[in-house]
Image (cartoon, helix red, strand yellow):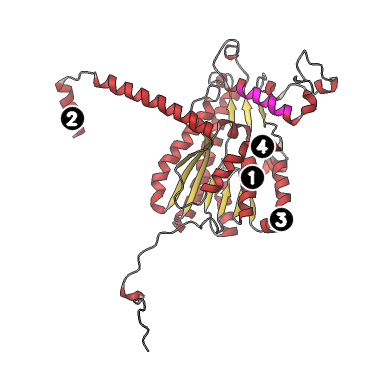
Amino acid sequence: MTQQNSAPPSSSRPQRPRSPHFPPHNAPRVWFITRGSSPIAIALARQVLDHGDYVVTGVQPIEFEKREGQSDDFRAFLEEAKKTERWRERLRVVGLDARVVGQCQAAVAEAVEAFGRVDVLLGSTSEAVIGAVEELAQSSRTITLVQDTFETNFFANVNIIKAVLPVMRRRNNGHVIMLTGITGHLGTPGLGMYCSSQWAIEGYCDSLAYEIAPFNIKMSIVQANMEVNVLTNRMTSVPPLPAYLQAENPAPLAREIFSGILDKLEQVSNPTNYADGKSPTDSNSTTSPDAAMHGPSMGDLLSSDTVTSLYAPLAPVVKASLIAETVHALTAIGGHDNPPARHIVGLEGVTAVKEKLKTTSEELEDFIEVSGAVDIAPNAEQAAAMMLE
């Protein structure tokens, strides 16, 4: 007996090709996070592992072995992962100094070996160098820092992107997220090298987005507030020049801004050293001699006469509040079929960028008005037209 109203055989008409899709948000995705020891990376890994995703996270072997930088926080995260059964089998840690091309290739190969693919790459390698442009030209050491800034903030991210693209392209699927900051839009006095490296990686990603779109690989730039990236990664300050001290130069240099922020953060982290509301090194302070033995405050270190590297003293509650919006944005965006090409985190950042774009629009209108007023000789106009032809 023939079944009525049956669907036509599949051979009667060709099937329409279906575009590949990312796993929906209720299905597991494989994340590759470049700098796994940063507060943002740890918080993101916790959140997506709890969601059911897989995570491959990179750490610099030397820092981890010597317990430098933020490695203690990462060790605590690893201990937590070992005790959490649903995390343990879905987390892989790989040695990765993304400035080295070979390590990037090996880390991606290890990720594919473990989980079969990489759905989302988060490029989050970033460090800030604090100092005016002229201060960065004082010595061979400070000049080297300029190159180091681009090696870390630009080339390290480029290297890991190039390593993962063949994997995504073969699957005709993938999502690259680059975590930058509103410094990719706004120049900041005292952060010239940091801002320029952010502009560089954003220009690279904007161009790359067009090249990889035919392979169904998405590109998103996520811009956090300046404080988020600077305070959650290593910052290095160069010796100040007298001409750029606040008393001589009224420009709101990053050194003064972050010195104040660091002192406030230190006060939250070590309240006993600031019992009377003053710094332990304040000449008028009445704190105990034991507090004075702690040496200069964190903010003072940014004005040291030597090149100084440090991490902000972020108390757990401050850290969680600082990174919450950024982590939420990354989790929401990662792996979507139609993610935003650019996302600015937080109202404050959106407002700052809008003001910058408003100024740019006004300058463009002035430029058009001035350009339209220029008289062009007929023969010059004809010559220009012939060249275009």
x and y, in percent, of residue 388 in the image: 21, 33
Residue wearing tag 2:
385
Quadrant containing the N terminus is: bottom left
- In the rendered structure, which amino acid carries the disc numbered 4? Lys
Residue 321, above or below 370: below
- The residues tagged by marks 2 and 4 sit, at their Cα atoms, a distance apart of 59 Å
Looking at the image, residue 208 sits to the left or right of residue 130; the answer is left
Helix, strand or loop under label 4:
helix
Whether residue 140 appears in this view of the structure is: no
- In the rendered structure, which amino acid carries the disc numbered 2? Ala
Within the magenta stretch, is there residue 262? Answer: yes
- Mark 3 or 1 closer to N-term? 1
Checking the image for residue 319, the label placed there is 4
Task: Give the main secondary structure, helix, strand or loop, of the magenta stretch.
Answer: helix
- The residues tagged by marks 4 and 3 sit, at their Cα atoms, a distance apart of 23 Å
Residue wearing tag 3:
84
